[in-house]
Image (spheres, rainbow, N blue to C red):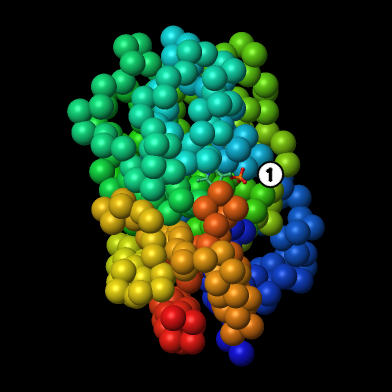
Amino acid sequence: MKIYNFSAGPAILPYEVKIQAQRELLDYNNSGMSVMEMSHRGKVYESIHNEAITLLKELMGLDDDYYILLLQGGASMQFEAIPLNLLQNGKADYIVTGNFALKAYKEAKKYGEINELASSKDANFTYIPDVEGLAPTQGADYLHITTNNTIFGTRYTKLPNVDVPLVADMSSNILSEEMDYNKFSLIYAGAQKNLGIAGLTIVIVKKALTENPMSICPTMLKYSIMAKNNSLYNTPSTFSIYIAMLTLRWLKSIGGVKEIQTRNQEKANLLYDYIDNSSLYSNPVRPCDRSIMNVPFVTPSAELDAKFVKEAQEQGLLALKGHRLVGGMRASIYNAMPLDGVKKLIEFMKKFELENA
Ligand code: PMP
C-alpha cells in the first residue's frame, strides 16, 4: 500500500531526496565516509555546507545584503535570539496570529517593551488581521509576523508595508510560494517541514542588523559570531544540512519556487474545494487567509473525527490528527507532498462521507 504522510513536522521528504541519501549513506561522493561521520572542518563537508547556502540564496532570490545562517535550537530558539540581536531602542511590535506567534511575543517580552500590534485571538486565530495601514509603534526596532500558522491553517497573502524591519517566522511556508524575500529584514525557519529534517534552523538576516546585539546576548545566539564563522563557530547539524542541501537541489531541479507554488496551489485548491462542497467536513478559516501548507478540517463530532483519523491511517493516510488546540483533522501538504497524496486523501474523504453522513 502506498503511504502518504500528512504530518505537520517533522514532515514528508521528497522521495528523490530519501533515495539519494540512501545511496550515499555509507560513502558520500567516494570520500569513504558517511556524511554522518565526517569532520565539519573538512573539504567534503564544507562543499555541502556552502552549496546549501548558495542554493537558498538562489532559490529565494536574495540579494547580497543578507547573511544566511545554518543554526540549531529550532525556530523556538529564535524567539529569544531575535530580540537579543535586534533590540536597539528596546521596543518591538508583534502580530499574534497563533500559538507560535504568541510564544515568540512572550519570549521577546523578557527583553524589552514589546507590543501586540494586532491579534486574531478573538476568533480563535481563524483569520489574519488586516495589515493595511498598520502603524508600528514609534521607535520600534522591528515588526514580527508568522507568515504561515501551522496549527490554525492561516497565511498572510499581503505583507505589512511598514518602514521598520520586517521579521518573519516562515517555519511552515518557506519556499512554498513566490514572495519578495528581500522585503524582509530577517527570515527564520526550522528545516523539518519544507527544508528537510529536524536539527537545522535557517536564519536569513540583513547584515546591518547584526552589529549591535544586546550585551546579555549569549555568544551562541549572536548572529555576528555565527556569520563571521560561516555558521561553523561550533559543530553544526551536519547531516540535517546535508539533507537540506539535497532538498534544495530537488526544488531547483523541478523548477524552483515558481513551479512548487503552482503545484502547492493546485493541491490546496483541490482540497479546499472538496471541503467547501461537502456536507460533512468544514474548515473554519476565512477563505482569503487560508494556508496552502496546513489544512485543518472537522466533521460535526469529535467521535467522528477520531473514527476518520483511525480509518484514514488504515488506508495509508498518516498523521491526520489535528493539533490539540483545534481538534479535528489537519492535512499538512508541504512541498514534498505529491498531488497523488491529496487526491488519495480526497477519495478517502468522499468514501467516509458516504458511509457516515
Ligand atoms: N513556528 C512555527 C510556525 C512552527 O510551525 C513551529 C513548529 N511546528 C515552530 C515555530 C517551532 O519550531 P521548532 O520546533 O523548530 O522550535
Q: Nearer the viewer, residue 217 or 354?
A: 354
Q: Position of residue 304 (x, y in %)?
A: 55, 72
Quarter of the image for residue 178 reads: bottom left
Where does residue 2 sit, x and y in percent of width and height?
58, 86
The residue shown at (62%, 59%) is 10
Residue corresponding to mark 1: 236
Q: Decide: is 137 above or below 179.
A: above
Residue 74: percent from left, percent from top: 62, 42
Which quadrant would the N terminus be assigned to in this image? bottom right
Whether residue 125 can be seen here: yes
Q: Secondary structure at mark 1?
A: loop
Question: Could you say where residue 54 lies in the image, as x and y percent from the top left?
Answer: 46, 50
Q: Against 215, is 38 above or below?
A: below
Q: Is residue 200 left or right of residue 179?
A: right
- Which residue does the image show at 75% across and 59% down from the upper left? 36
Q: Is residue 74 above or below residue 103?
A: below
- Using the rendered image of the protein, determine whether residue 12 is visible from the camera's viewpoint: no
Total numbered labels placed on residues in the image: 1
Amino acid residing under circle 1: Pro
Queried on whether the Cβ of the residue with tag 1 lies below 8 angstroms from ligand 1, the answer reads no
Q: Residues within 10 Å of mark 1 (few under 14, many from 20)?
A: some
